[in-house]
Image (tube, rainbow, N blue to C red):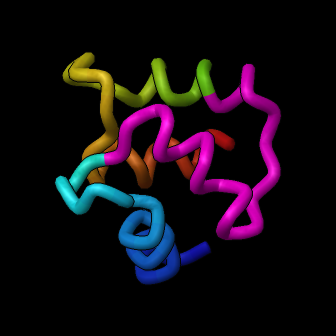
Amino acid sequence: MNADQIKTIFAKMDVNGDGSLSFEEITEGLPKVGIKVDISKIKASFEAVDTDKNGSLDPEEFVSFMAKI
């Protein structure tokens, strides 16, 4: 998956348009873009890449997240 594809996925999943993805947006959004991942793997990856520990992923953190799942 290339950077443009990841940016497109991020934009589709950012339901509230705030420029970051909450855990809920990710768990609901991944299946909608055709990505099936176990919830425990999503949680572990989310926590690992949320470097500022604000409970959401910015675009850079999301790139790291996508590399982990």
Q: As rendered, which of 55 and 66 lies closer to the eye?
A: 55
Left or right of 19? Residue 23 is right
The reply, left or right, for residue 53 in relation to residue 48 is left
Q: Is residue 3 above or below residue 13?
A: below
Q: Specify start and end residues of the magenta stretch as a single range.
A: 21-42
Total marks in image: 0
Q: Quadrant of the C terminus?
A: top right
- Return the x and y of residue 4 as percentages of the image width and height: 42, 82
Most extreme residue toward the front is 16
Q: Is residue 18 left or right of residue 46?
A: left
The answer to whether residue 32 is magenta is yes
Q: Which secondary structure dominates the residues rendered in magenta?
A: helix
Above or below residue 41? Residue 26 is: below
Residue ID at (22%, 22%): 54
Q: For the point 23% across and 62% down, which residue is it?
A: 17
Residue at 68% over, 64% down: 32
Residue that appears at 60% across and 22% down: 43
Q: Quadrant of the N terminus?
A: bottom right
- Please determine whether, in this image, residue 51 is positioned above or below residue 16: above
Task: Give coordinates of residue 15: x percent, y percent.
Answer: 37, 59
Q: Position of residue 61 (x, y in %)?
A: 34, 43
Q: In the drawing, does residue 15 fall left or right of residue 31?
A: left
Is residue 17 on the magenta stretch?
no
**Rendered location of residue 16, percent (x, y):** 28, 56
Q: Viewer-proximal residue, 30 or 44?
A: 30
Q: Which residue is nearer to you in this view: 53 or 17?
A: 17
Task: Please say if 41 is above or below 65.
Answer: above
Residue that protrudes farthest toward the bottom in the picture: 4
